[in-house]
Amino acid sequence: MAGPKLKPEELASKIKYNLPPNGWMDQPVEFREGTFNYSGNPKNVEYLQLPNPRKWQPTDPDWQLPENWKEIILEGLRDRLHRFRSLQIFMDICVRCGACADKCHFFIGSGDPKNMPVMRAELLRAVYRKDFTLAGKIFGKYAGARELTLDVVKEWFYYFYQCTQCRRCSVFCPYGIDTAEITLLVRELLSLIGVNIDWIVTPVANSFRTGNHLGIQPHGFKDSIDFAVDELESITGVKVEAPINKKGAEILFITPSADYFGSPHYYTLLGYLALFHEIGLDYTWSTYASEGGNFGSFLSHDMMKSLNAKMYAEARRLGVKWILGGECGHMWRVVHQYMNTLNGPADFLEEPVSPVTGTKFGNARSTKMVHICEFTADLIKNGKIKLDKSRNDNRRVTFHDSCNPARALGLIEEPRFIIRNACNNFFEMPENTIKEQTFCCGSGAGLGTDENLEMRMRGGLPRANAVKFVKEKHGVNFLGCICAIDKATLPPLMEYWVGGVDVGGVHELVGNALIMKGEKERTTDLRGDPLHIEGNRHV
Amino acid sequence: MNAIFSLVAVIVIIAAAFLGASIPRLDFLFGVVFPYAAITVFLAGIIYRVIKWSASPVPFHIPTVAGQQKSLPWIKDSPLESPHNTWGVIGRMALEILFFRSLFRNTKMEMKSGPKLVYGSSKYLWLGAIAFHWSMLIIVLRHLRLFMQPIPSFVLGLDSLDGFFQVGLPGLYITDVLILIALSYLILRRLTVRRIRYFSLASDYFPLFLLFSIAGTGVLMRYFYRIDLVNVKELAVGLFSFHPAVPQGTGVLFYVHLFLVCTLLAYFPFSKLMHMPGIFLSPTRNLANNSRMKRHVNTWNHPVRVHTYEEYEDEFREKMREAGLPLDKE
Ligand code: HEM
Ligand code: SF4
Ligand code: SF4
């Protein structure tokens, strides 16, 4: 992938935290190439039965909105205020203290004051005040109220598609005001008048139809799993089973589709296959629920529900006992915080118990879905797998907490425990950039497109900068993570800002280190790289 | 601009009170009618808004957690940052409400050349906020000695604690000094930090100016232009016991102070000051991180269009058969 037109130094020197002289309401939005996403493909908008399918682009002066677009939005807002206490509270109680202002990676990387989370929310709040509060109705602009116009809609589109729903701001806000919630609801409103982006609409349509966002059909799915099985055999000498759509299996395994179609995700897939074989897991893959990720959660609560429904439906159809979920960020937000509410109760499943260790996963007793890091950490703790750490000695590892596992689950120690047991060289990034304070990859929530590359590099700067720090200090050359979007978008980010750092999953490290019964002597890691490279050590 | 607008508004309020209270016959208006009206608006307004908030359901279970979850028994969880039960939530909320836990986390980002990003600890806002809020709470509680006869002992205790240093006559209260310093800091911060000024509205300056003038007139009355406290107590006890009487000769300054307080009370339910009740209802803070342990029910969970397995198999049956994948319908 080509980088943005600007070189890193040029881009960095252009980040200025200056403020325009006049008030923010008088500063019109500018769609600059490289900083926004293209509109949803009308064919897929129509396939999903979403409103107002048409050909348009954000740079068009006329967005061809329905005649009564304003009514639709205000009515939609009223409806959501009644349905979401979060929205109602977040609209009313912000004191504009500014604690959240410099916590957003998009503000840090762009210097654009409207990327301060408080400003992002104010874009909606101003309209809310105008039409839903007494003060706003009487005092208008003096009460911070603003008329809803086409320019406001354009501004919404620009800035609410410049938020990755990472929730870092929410950690620092004294009231927990969650911009991700506001962003999702504004995207819902925009979608009501046919304003969507393609890297959400098209993956959603694919997921709806084929079960995964890449649009891979069942036979294609089987081909890639078969291929991975062969590849794993050539590296380890062990032939593993990978059952697909198998009724009566004990566990259904669901992971993001990029794991079996993308790189470097693929090496994590090899890690899963090796691990499941080694512990003799009775499990199955599914072609119908062949996507853990949920692009619907970037568009609307309804779409989130629609795509998520496949997980429980498939678990029921196959008659499994419980579900195991692979490495993914927003997928896990949906599974942890939404799935049981949206599509439960999962009373047809059993409380998850590890068939290998007998451990009960009490924390998943209602939703009945376990995170692979919880599962593997338990295996290691109970001594059920043997790991040869030295096989990862060509890696000096740091770990990027993905936003959602960190701030929605609190899944912080499990992956670290696994990493420490799978490799010898592990180094943490500075504390303000990890765990609950972790910085986003800058490309989540549907923003990971080529056309948006400059903004992605800007938004990813805080993360990249922290990696650069440990690279310089400890010679780190491997950035571990547990998210499919990370695996797709951190490599170009590293290439742009840091250089010489590979990105990969935690279960790739597990796969490298895993000693399998009957394996041949390994000469390469799962990537096919030689196991011990001299000179790739501390620099 | 927004700041000037608010400043003017507060000056107008002070002037109105000054003029109004100078007219003897308006005593009753300023001493009785306005306080009752303000208290009514305050209470009714808050109740109305809280009921309105509560009328909207909490459809999803969306705590923002800031620490290790409770999962495997040998992994130490953080019960206050990622509480998994009600006790934990109570603890987390108490930390937020009493000590502004999240604000305490605050950092300040700086970009050095390179580019190199550094995040320094930044506790001034927290300190200013804590100093202001706690001082205000103590001052409000101290005021109870005016309303109650006999004076409750905890109020007397608070009084002597607050006057601990025993400087000057009448004794200086620490909170009086703190609140003025804290409010000055908050005002100056809003005016001088350009980024904060950029998004500050008139409704952000207004309460600060209002609070400052309330504290200011209070301090003037106590330390500089002494007023007759016996009169004030008579009025306050009268109001409190619903037998209002307006004593003569209390002084205009007192009515200005009182009118400013009435304005604050009446303004409260329509403003961002509603963060006081609001913080208790914030779903990212007041829910336990037990999302997978207990099912959360959404009262409006409506059905959506789904793509069923049957539809899926119908579309891909041939390809699945060729690939040797099992089928439900042959
Ligand atoms: C449960 C009780 C309360 C809590 C937990 C609370 C918490 C907070 C916090 C965390 C802030 C942000 C920091 C800051 O900007 O100072 C704040 C701001 C503020 N609070 Fe409160 N508050 C409470 C009650 C009140 C009350 C009763 C008032 C006034 C009558 C008040 C007036 C203000 C004002 C004016 C600000 C904004 C300060 C500024 O503009 O810089 N608060 N509050
Ligand atoms: S930290 Fe919270 S209250 Fe403060 S400005 Fe940001 S959203 Fe508003
Ligand atoms: S959720 Fe993340 S991207 Fe969105 S405003 Fe907050 S910090 Fe920025």
Image: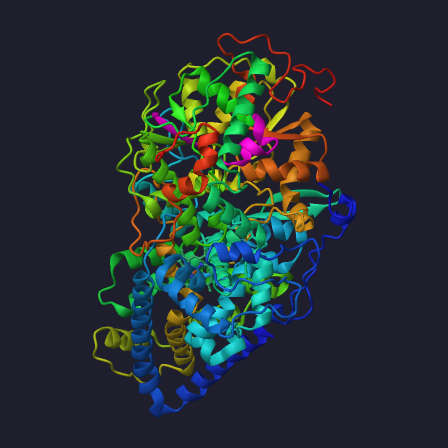
Horizontal arrangement in the rendering, residue A359 relative to residue A422 (left or right): left
Residue B81 visible in the picture: no
Vertically, is A386 above or below A68? Answer: above
Q: Depth check: give the residue in front, B327 or A126.
A: B327
x and y, in percent, of residue A221 in the image: 51, 32
Q: Quadrant of residue B91?
A: top left
Q: How many marks?
A: 0
Vertically, is B323 above or below A240? Answer: below
Vertically, is A527 above or below A133? Answer: above
Instruction: Point out the quarter of the image occupied by ligand 1.
Output: bottom left
Identity of the residue drawn at 25% across and 63% down: B151
Q: How is the image coloured?
A: rainbow
Vertically, is B203 above or below A314? Answer: below
Residue A259 within the segment the image draws in magenta: yes
x and y, in percent, of residue A264 in the image: 61, 30
Horizontal arrangement in the rendering, residue A475 relative to residue B163 (left or right): right
Identity of the residue drawn at 47% across and 54% down: A48
Residue bounds of the magenta highlight: A249-267
Q: Depth check: give the residue in front, A320 or B312.
A: B312
Identity of the residue drawn at 36% across and 50% down: B60
Please identify the quadrant where the N terminus of chain B is shown: bottom right
Residue A467 visible in the picture: yes
Identity of the residue drawn at 72% across and 52% down: A15
